[in-house]
Image (spheres, helix red, strand yellow):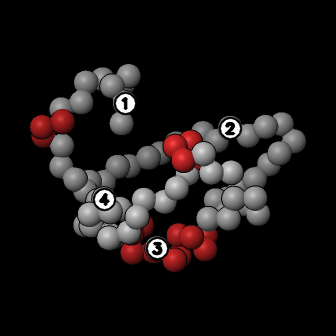
Amino acid sequence: MSTNFGPIDWDHLVFPTWMLVDWVRVYQPKGSYNVGCDPPEFPTADYINTYIEAYTNPNLTTWVDDYKQIVPKNRLVDGCT
């Protein structure tokens, strides 16, 4: 969520919620085409299937408190490669 599109009324937000999306734009480098979310260099399907409840149960809204798992490491915050 971004305040760039308008103000956010944090006090009246209801979670979980539903959003309807009718357009998604995907940017890819020229000559590098990949349609999907499980490319060989970033395999995600096995990871999602391992933690499928976290991705499909709308009542789990936090990874640590609700799902009882440690937060997965990532390259942006943890410097993973």
Task: Please name the residue shown 38% across and 22% down the image.
Answer: 4
User: Is the residue 15 above or below the residue 67 in the image?
Assistant: above
Q: Nearer the viewer, residue 66 or 52?
A: 66
Label of residue 55 in the image: none
**Residue ID at (22%, 53%):** 15
Of mark 3 and mark 4, the one earlier in the sequence is: 3
Residue 78 position in % (x across, y down): 54, 47
Which secondary structure, mark 4?
Answer: loop
Residue 11, visible in the rendered structure: yes
Label at residue 51? 3
Q: Nearer the viewer, residue 37 or 43?
A: 43
Quick one: label 3 or label 2, which is nearer the N terminus? 2
* Tag 4 near tag 1, CB within 8 Å: no
Q: Are marks 4 and 2 in contact (CB under 8 Å)?
A: no
The answer, for residue 58, to whether it is visible in the render is no
Report the residue marked by disc 4.
62
**Amino acid on which disc 2 is placed:** Tyr
Name which quarter of the figure residue 42 lies in.
bottom right
- Could you tell whether 77 is left or right of 19 in the image? right
Q: Secondary structure at mark 3?
A: loop
Mark 3 is on which residue type? Tyr
